[in-house]
Image (cartoon, grey):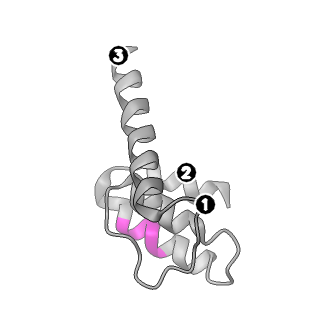
Amino acid sequence: MSAEVGLARRPFDDLNATLDRLRQVTANGHFAYYVDIATAIGDLPQPAGSAIQWIVDAHTVRERWHALVTARQTHLRGTQ
């Protein structure tokens, strides 16, 4: 499964293909939250009909994931 998540690091054009693949490999319910996280990281709309229940509201979770990725990208750009 970790190889599937690694695909999300490809250019933005590949994100939809990655999400489709994530949906396929998590269709049994295991690790289904990966799809929600990947859409948050890509700043895409939340998946329709998501059954994931977070400890805090979904909007806050999405903001935190997106901020984490943005901060990491900023850090990496600064170290090059």
Residue at 46% across, 59% down: 38
Amino acid type shown at disc 1: Ile
Q: Position of residue 36 (x, y in %)?
A: 49, 66
Closer to viewer: mark 3 or mark 1 = 1
Residue at 45% across, 69% down: 19
Spatial distance from mark 1 to mark 2, Cα to Cα? 25 Å
- Foreground residue, 24 or 66? 66
Secondary structure at badge 3 equals helix
Q: Residues within 10 Å of mark 1 (few under 14, many from 20)?
A: few
Q: Which mark is on residue 78?
A: 3
- Foreground residue, 50 or 56? 56
Q: Residues within 10 Å of mark 3 (few under 14, many from 20)?
A: few
Secondary structure at badge 1 equals loop
Spatial distance from mark 3 to mark 1, Cα to Cα? 33 Å
Q: Position of residue 42 (x, y in %)?
A: 35, 55
Q: Position of residue 55 (x, y in %)?
A: 61, 60
Range of residues picked out in magenta: 16-20
Q: How many marks?
A: 3
**Which of the two discs, 1 and 2, labels the residue nearer the N terminus?**
2
What residue sits right under mark 2 in the picture? 6
**Which of the two discs, 3 and 2, labels the residue nearer the N terminus?**
2
Residue projecting furthest to the left: 13
**Location of residue 53 by image quarter:** bottom right
Residue projecting furthest to the front: 56
